[in-house]
Image (tube, rainbow, N blue to C red):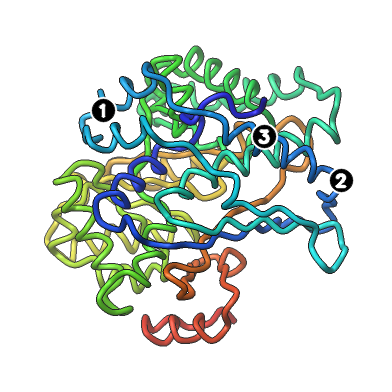
Amino acid sequence: MIIPSLLDTDLYKFTMMQVVLHHFPQAQVEYRFKCRNSGIDLVPYIDEIRAEVTQLCQLRFTEDELAYLRGMRFIKSDFVDFLALFHLNEKYVTITPAPAGNGEIEISIVGPWLHTILFEVPLLAIVNEVYFRRTQPRPDMEEGRRRLREKLALLKAPQYADCVIADYGTRRRFARDWQEEVLLEMRQLLGPQLAGTSNVHFARLHNIVPLGTMAHEYLQACQALGPRLRDSQVFALENWAREYRGDLGIALSDTVGFDAFLRDFDLYFCKLFDGVRHDSGDPIVWGEKMLAHYTANRVDPRGKTLIFSDSLDIPRVIELYERFRGRCRLAFGVGTNLTNDLGYTPLQIVIKMVRCNGQPVAKLSDTPEKTMCDDAGYLAYLRQVFAVQPAA
């Protein structure tokens, strides 16, 4: 069984799910799967993926897991009580070969947001592990260990002693056991330079700090749930602050493009949120603009945190650290390059929300190929409302 626990997911799934329970319990959503690699044939593995989803839907939270969640200062008791009754339902998931017959598969998740939000991360982890255990039945684990040690050694140079990284690699990991090994090696070799992990299951098992706040789907859903589209980003941030009262204060900056985010992220939000997270576009340009924005709003950026999390490897982490250290607080979330680097090409797979309450929603990424929407008319309207120019 690939997924052993409903905690085997990213923390921000739970933090968003609590907001859904308290603010949007009746919202209906639709998610779609996409593989960005060309020439990948996943059709032979459909039955195995379906079987793993069936087992996933048999899982329940244990009393020990619920007690762990209850111990987090920002998790509320009624949410844990709800999770005690919760399970994933297979009826919300459809997995079929794509009609084009080109080896692609279609995965759709349709149903109540509250009851489907936990599917994304374990489903992606299932697709990854099924694919790699079928295509690489005897993986070169020693090569993976060599690569990992080589990367981590770069961070142990004395000049990087306060450069901290976190594991963000659950959804695209090579395998569950490999992610666990990577985490334990990071803890041993990096010590306090390991800030934590997004994976709640491993955080609990190994007494590592769990990390996460919000994902794009939350801000996307607010495009349909807010009072009007233009105010959807402000609506999302205000509801988040209302729920967490100053906790989990990292805002995601690129759901409708960074420039549109800055127009909404005014003095109030600059002071209210602890920092922001980068997930698309040029990270250096983003960081410089973010620091300038704080300064323009009379907020000292040295008290704010910039989190970089877009396709990072360790040399890129070091480059960004050297650029911005001393000018703000820094954190780095590294995913695929840590948990799926054994010498094989990783799958670039995502599951994104495409509808909420029957209305299209979209992410206007600062990296154009990350934009995902199946309604061209809505995408054009979203660009117009937020004054986002199409990529050249």
Element marked by disc 3:
loop
162 left or right of 144? left
The residue wearing badge 2 is 44
- Who is closer to the viewer here, 125 or 297? 125
Number of the front mark, 1 or 3: 1
Q: Amino acid at mark 1?
A: Met
Mark closer to the chain start, 3 or 2: 2
| Inter-mark Cα distance, 1 to 3 | 29 Å
Q: Amino acid at mark 3?
A: Asn
Who's the residue at 38% across and 33% down the image? 85
- Residue 222 at what x, y percent from top left? 34, 66
- Residue 126 at what x, y percent from top left? 67, 37
Instruction: Tell me how many marks there are.
Output: 3
The residue wearing badge 3 is 340
Who's the residue at 46% across and 19% down the image? 190
Q: Which mark is residue 72?
A: 1
